[in-house]
Each structure stands twice: as structure tokens, then as C-alpha cells.
């Protein structure tokens, strides 16, 4: 059997294994190793697989991943998310649906200290959704806001997915992180406008507005709840923009700052708040590193088979325009988002698609932002909408999975509109990265 046929058979085998519930890291590694064995023999396959696995997981570029994960978990266990929500909610008091809007911007701010959508959605489903319901908001809309707003957390630095993309593609992680700022803020503004518009057109979505009157003195007093976020954001953004830190150094310094904040605010209880964060970080990081290693073995297999350049040539021969190609890629990731998680999608597709991107001369940062945005939309699409499942896992007993999916549907459509803007207006993704020293 020729190498290309072996590669195609391996890709089919990969999806079969995933359908049977095999972990993505193990599936990628197993298919990559067996495919390499079939092409070059057992001994070269063993040596090659071990070497690429070690080279990938031992990479210095991967250090931001556990750092940002740890920072996110410490922020969630250290009550920083609750302080953000309480403060912002006072500032939008009096606006119909203001608590929903404050949830969106709370998720945006929380995204500066938590680089994962799932954690953001889950945390605010506990903090904000019950409060919105007590204020009279429809339960589907309340949980839909929380599930969908988690997407913003993966765009605003520090984004774990941006780091993963940079490690897999070789692009600048610092520029990728900064590139998510404008799309994240644009998505937050679009979600806020959607909430206001929905409640304006359909007042029954909020049966009553029982929020009390908040004075300006209370508003300004509430700003003290935002100081930890401001410090961390200043460290990350200032360090990256000013050229003071590499992304790895920024991750380490920002994580240490969050740790110090927890020690200062929790006093004698800081260990109880920090220890679960370390445990969860170890679990999640081990899973991600296994995926990285498996993806490296699988990529080696695709390179040896020659299927990646052949697939690239096939796509190029279709003579799609730049916008046509990006729309096709976005649709591909939207479909894959119904079946796979974010890191799995990147691990499988990047080795095949990156040669096409480079051959077409596309701006790598622009392309990356479009891909990340398309992948993130998959976090709220059935049947594998992880943010929806995260919200449902912590939701009140009378809230069903269907309720959360239904509440997320309007934000899915708004997210598609933002994705289209990112495709047709590249500066939205590239202007800030160009300012990095």
C-alpha cells in the first residue's frame, strides 16, 4: 500500500477511535505510530515517535500553558470572579438587562486572568445566572448568557488556545495573544447589544426588575473589587506590548501575582484556596501535554506519507479567493466543532492546512484569529458544546441541557456575524499585534 493510502486509512481510523471514546492524545499517538511503522518500519517508527514526543512536550514554548491554567484556577477559587461581577453589576444598575450585560463584561475581565472558556462559563453560571433569575430574567437567557460569554475568555489574553495554536504552528505566541483583544472586545459589545435588544423587543424575557437603586458612591466604592484584575492585566499587556516579557515570562509573573493576591486577601485560608488549583492544573496540563505529544507523532506520520502537501496542492488547485478560502475553513471548523473539542481540532487540522495558508501568502495572525473564533463558536454548538455542558453541570435543578442550548442560540448567531467581520476586515485582528515591540 502506498504512503498516501496509508495516511488516508489512518485518518479514517483516527475518527473511528474518537467515535469510540478513545482519548484524543492516545488516538493521535497510536495512529501516528502505526502509520509511521507501516511506512518506514518498526525501529525507525519507535525512535522517531519517542523523539518527536519528547521534543514537543519538553518545549520551553509550552510553559505558558500550565501557568495560565494555574492562574485561571487560582482566580476562580480565590473569589476574584465574584468581586468582578459585583463591581460591574453596580455600574450597569438601572439598565434593563444590566445584570446580563455586567455578566458579559465580567467574563471579559475574568478572561484576563483565566484563559479557558469552560472555566469562565462554569464560574459565572454559579455566580451570575441565579442572580439574573432572581431579578426576573428567563432561565434560558440567563444560562445562555453565561455559557456563551465564556467564548470571550478564550480570545482575551491569556488565551490557552492561542498558546496552543502558536506552539503547533510556530507563530509568535505574543502576537497571537494580543491579536485576540479587539475580537474579544467586539464580541463582548455585540453580546451586550444583543441582550439589550432582546429584552427591548421581548420584555417577557425579564418578568420584573427588582434591582434596587445604586448610588454613585456605591459604584465608586465597588471599584476596589477590580484592582486584582487591573494589576494582572497591566502585567500581561504592559509586559507584552513593551517588550519587557516574553509570553512565557509574562505567564510566570502574572501567575505569581495572582498567587500573592490570594495570599493577601485570603490571609490564613490561602492554602485551602490555592491547593485545589494546583491539583486541577496538574490534571488538565497532563491531558493537554499528552495531546501535544500525540499530535507531534501524528504530524510526523502525515509528513512522511506526503498527504499534507498533496492535500495542500489539491486545495490550492481549487483556486479559491482569499475570502472564499477563509469562509470554507470557518465552515469546516464549525462542523468539526459539533464533534471535537478545540485542541483536538487544531491538532488534527493544522498539519494539513498550514502549508496551504503559507502557500497562499495569508497573514498568519489574521488566519489564526479566524480559526480560533470559528473553533470557539463550536463551544456552544450541539452536541459537543463544552461551554453549554459546563454551564449545565453547575446549573440549578430546573434547568435542562436543552434550556442552555436554546438560550445560547441568539449568541451563536451573533458570534457568526462577528466571525464574518473578522474575515472581511483583517485589521481587526492584526493592528494590535503590529504594535508589539
Image (spheres, helix red, strand yellow):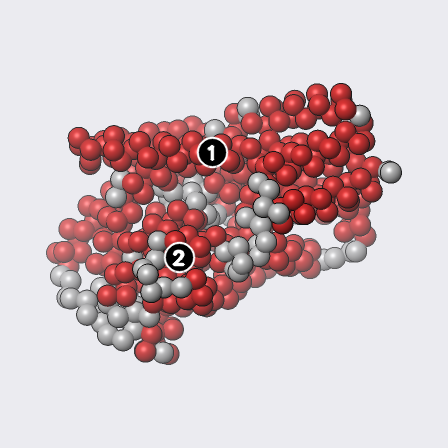
Q: Position of residue 32 (x, y in %)?
A: 70, 34
Q: Position of residue 228 (x, y in %)?
A: 27, 40
Which residue sits furthest front?
20
Q: Position of residue 106 (x, y in %)?
A: 32, 53
Q: Is residue 43 above or below residue 128?
A: above
Q: Position of residue 220 (x, y in %)?
A: 17, 53
Q: Nearer the viewer, residue 161 or 52?
A: 52
The quarter of the displayed image where residue 421 is located? bottom right
Pointer 1 or 2: first along the chain? 1
The quarter of the displayed image where residue 165 is located? top right
Q: CA distance from mark 1 to mark 2?
A: 24 Å
Task: Report the side of 116 relative to 319 (left or right).
Answer: left
Task: Look at discs 1 and 2 and give the one toward the viewer.
Answer: 2
Judging by the rendered image, the residue that carries numbered circle 1 is 285
Q: Is any atom of residue 170 visible in this view? A: no
Judging by the rendered image, the residue that carries numbered circle 2 is 392
Amino acid at each position: 500500500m502506498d504512503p498516501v493510502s496509508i495516511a488516508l486509512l489512518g485518518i479514517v481510523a483516527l475518527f473511528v477511535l474518537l467515535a469510540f471514546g478513545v482519548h484524543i492524545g492516545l488516538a493521535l499517538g497510536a495512529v501516528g505510530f502505526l502509520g509511521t511503522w507501516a511506512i518506514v518500519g518498526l525501529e525507525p517508527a519507535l525512535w522517531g515517535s519517542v523523539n518527536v514526543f519528547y521534543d514537543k512536550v519538553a518545549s520551553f514554548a509550552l510553559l505558558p500553558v500550565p501557568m495560565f491554567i494555574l492562574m485561571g484556577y487560582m482566580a476562580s477559587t480565590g473569589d476574584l470572579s465574584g468581586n468582578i461581577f459585583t463591581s460591574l453589576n453596580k455600574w450597569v444598575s438601572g439598565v434593563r438587562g444590566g445584570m446580563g450585560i455586567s455578566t458579559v463584561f465580567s467574563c471579559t475581565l475574568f478572561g484576563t486572568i483565566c484563559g479557558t472558556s469552560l472555566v469562565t462559563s462554569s464560574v459565572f453560571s454559579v455566580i451570575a445566572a441565579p442572580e439574573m433569575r432572581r431579578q426576573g430574567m428567563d432561565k434560558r437567557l440567563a444560562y445562555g448568557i453565561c455559557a456563551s460569554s465564556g467564548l470571550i475568555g478564550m480570545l482575551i489574553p491569556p488565551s490557552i488556545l492561542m498558546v496552543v495554536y502558536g506552539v503547533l504552528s510556530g507563530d509568535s505566541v505574543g502576537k497571537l495573544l494580543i491579536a485576540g483583544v479587539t475580537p474579544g472586545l467586539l464580541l463582548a459589545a455585540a453580546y451586550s447589544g444583543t441582550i439589550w435588544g432582546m429584552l427591548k423587543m421581548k420584555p417577557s424575557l425579564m418578568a420584573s426588575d427588582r434591582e434596587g437603586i445604586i448610588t454613585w458612591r456605591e459604584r465608586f466604592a465597588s471599584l476596589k473589587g477590580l484592582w486584582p484584575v487591573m494589576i494582572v492585566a497591566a502585567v500581561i499587556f504592559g509586559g507584552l506590548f513593551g517588550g519587557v516579557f516574553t509570553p512565557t515570562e509574562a505567564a510566570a509573573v502574572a501567575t505569581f501575582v495572582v498567587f500573592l493576591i490570594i495570599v493577601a486577601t485570603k490571609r490564613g485560608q490561602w492554602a485551602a484556596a490555592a491547593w485545589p488549583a494546583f491539583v486541577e492544573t496538574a490534571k488538565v496540563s497532563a491531558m493537554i501535554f499528552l495531546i501535544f505529544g500525540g499530535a507531534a507523532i501524528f504530524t510526523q506520520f502525515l509528513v512522511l506519507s506526503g498527504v499534507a502537501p498533496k492535500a495542500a496542492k489539491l486545495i490550492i488547485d481549487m483556486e479559491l479567493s482569499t475570502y472564499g478560502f477563509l469562509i470554507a475553513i470557518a465552515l469546516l471548523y464549525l462542523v468539526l466543532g459539533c464533534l471535537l473539542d478545540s485542541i483536538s481540532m487544531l491538532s488534527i487540522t493544522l498539519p494539513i492546512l498550514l502549508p496551504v495558508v503559507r502557500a497562499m501568502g495569508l497573514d498568519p495572525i489574521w488566519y489564526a484569529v479566524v480559526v480560533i473564533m470559528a473553533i470557539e463558536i463550536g463551544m456552544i454548538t450541539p452536541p459537543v458544546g463544552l461551554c453549554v455542558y459546563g454551564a449545565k453541570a453547575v446549573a440549578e435543578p430546573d434547568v435542562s441541557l436543552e434550556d442552555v442550548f436554546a438560550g445560547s442560540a441568539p449568541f451563536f448567531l451573533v458570534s457568526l456575524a462577528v466571525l464574518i467581520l473578522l474575515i472581511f476586515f483583517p485589521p481587526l485582528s492584526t493592528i494590535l499585534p503590529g504594535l508589539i515591540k
